Image (spheres, rainbow, N blue to C red):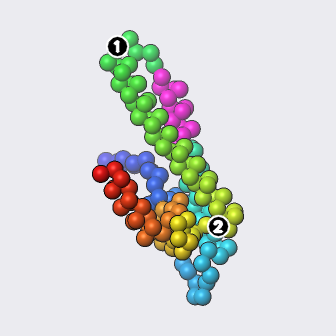
Amino acid sequence: MKKKKNKKQTSSLNVLAIAGLKPYQKKNNEQYMNEDQMLHFDKILQTWKNQLQKEIDHTLFYMQDKATNFPDPIDRATQEEEFSLDLRNRDRSRKLIKKIEKTLKKIQEKNFGYCDSCGIEIGIRRLEARPTANLCIDCKTLAEIREKQMTG
C-alpha cells in the first residue's frame, strides 16, 4: 500500500525547510543582523515569496482548467464555492507576498530585524519562526492586549 503524500503547506513554520536551510547558527561575538544573517533571511523570504507565487499561479491554472458550466444548479454552486475559497486563500497569499516584499526592502535598506515600535532586536529565532515580524515579542504582546481591549 502506497502512502499518500500531502501537499506541503507554506507557512512560517516550515519556510526554513522549503528554502533548504537550517536554523542560523550564531557565531561567537557576531554582530546582530550582519551580512550573513541578512543573506540568510533574504533567502528565506525570497523562497517563501516564490512558493506563494507558484501556488497562486497553480490556482489560476486549476480554475481555468476545471471551470465547467454544470447544468445542475447544485453542482454549479459547489464549484463556485470551491473557487471562492481558493480565491480567498490566494488573496491572503497576495497580501502575504506584499508583506514579504516590504520585509525584503527592509533587508536592502539594512533596517531589518529591529522592532518598529521600540527599536530593540527582534531576535533570530523569532524571525525564523515569523520572517515578516516587525515587532519584538513584548511590543507584539502589548499590541494584542490593546486590540483585545478595543474589540471587547
For the residue pair 12 and 111, the one nearer the viewer reads as 111
Up-down: is 70 above or below 16?
Answer: above
Name the front one of labels 2 and 1: 2
Residue 79 falls in image quadrant: top left
Would residue 16 be visible to someone looking at this image? no
Q: Secondary structure at mark 1?
A: loop
Residue 24 left/right relative to 81: right
Q: Residue at x 53, y 59 (%)?
A: 132
Q: Quadrant of residue 32?
A: bottom right
**Magenta stretch bounds:** 55-67
Horizontal arrangement in the rendering, residue 119 relative to residue 126 (left or right): right
Alpha carbons under labels 2 and 1: distance apart: 56 Å
Amino acid type at mark 2: Asn
Location of residue 30 in the rendering, given as x and y in whole percent from the top left corner: 61, 84
Tell me what residue is drawn at x 55 percent, y 65 percent: 116
In screen coordinates, is 100 left or right of 8? Answer: right
Residue 72: mark in rendering: 1
Q: Is residue 59 magenta?
A: yes
Which image quadrant for residue 82? top left
Residue 81 has which mark?
Answer: none
Compared with 97, 26 (above or below) is: below
The residue nearer to you, when weighing 81 against 2, is 81
Q: Residue at x 48, y 43 (%)?
A: 92
Closer to the chain start, of discs 2 and 1, is 1
Q: Mark 2 — residue?
A: 111
